Image: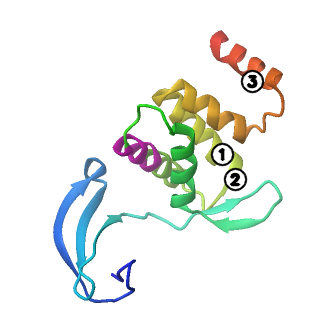
């Protein structure tokens, strides 16, 4: 594993332990050259997923992009990093379980919204506002009204 600080390839694993309820392995590493410490995660990947955007463009699935969007939606909420990681892992597992090589970005958004709705209502509304492209306050009102109806 290459050091993210000095790009040296001489790093050592100092500690390994299960993470994400056994779905990943967390490894603490130390660079032999600069002495920096960093963490890596090892996860099972069942298949390569391709995302089909609404424009028709196809891009490889990016777990980190999903993680960033969930993190932004949950920012300044009382939600710890481990919960966010579990949400992202759950979404990825669900997408892989579909058995499809190509998945629409719309489907990814729906899975993310469903997962966030179970975790935090504010994060759910934040994500929905970007995902559903809210433009005016009335868009929020209509969405919140539909939430209350459920």
Q: Position of residue 132 (x, y in %)?
A: 75, 37
Query: Per the image, is 102 magenta?
Result: no
The secondary structure type at the circle numbered 3 is helix
Q: Position of residue 14 (x, y in %)?
A: 16, 72
The secondary structure type at the circle numbered 2 is strand
Please report the residue visible at 34 percent of the width from the left and 89 percent of the height from the top. 8
* CA separation in Å, label 1 and label 2: 5 Å
**Furthest-front residue in this view:** 34
| Nearest to viewer (mark 1 / mark 3) | 3
Magenta highlight range = 81-89
Question: The N terminus is located in which quarter?
Answer: bottom left
Q: Which residue is mark 3?
A: 140
Q: Which residue is mark 1?
A: 107
Please report the residue visible at 51 percent of the width from the left and 46 percent of the height from the top. 71
Q: Are marks 1 and 2 in contact (CB under 8 Å)?
A: yes
N-terminal label among 3 and 2: 2
For disc 2, the neighbor class at 10 Å (few under 14, some 14 to 19, many from 20) is some
The secondary structure type at the circle numbered 1 is helix
* Magenta segment main secondary structure: helix
């Amino acid at each position: 594993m290459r050091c993210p600080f000095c790009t040296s390839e001489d790093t050592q694993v100092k500690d390994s332990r299960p993470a994400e309820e056994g779905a990943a392995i967390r490894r603490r590493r130390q660079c032999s050259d600069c002495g920096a410490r960093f963490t890596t995660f090892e996860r099972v990947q069942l298949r390569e997923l391709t995302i089909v955007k609404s424009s028709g463009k196809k891009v490889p699935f990016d777990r980190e992009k999903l993680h960033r969007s969930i993190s932004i939606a949950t920012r300044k909420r009382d939600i710890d990093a481990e919960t966010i990681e579990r949400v992202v892992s759950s979404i990825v597992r669900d997408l892989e379980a579909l058995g499809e090589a190509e998945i629409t970005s719309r489907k990814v958004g729906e899975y993310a919204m469903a997962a966030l709705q179970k975790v935090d209502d504010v994060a759910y509304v934040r994500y929905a506002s970007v995902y559903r492209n809210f433009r005016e306050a009335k868009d929020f009102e209509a969405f919140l009204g539909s939430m209350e109806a459920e």
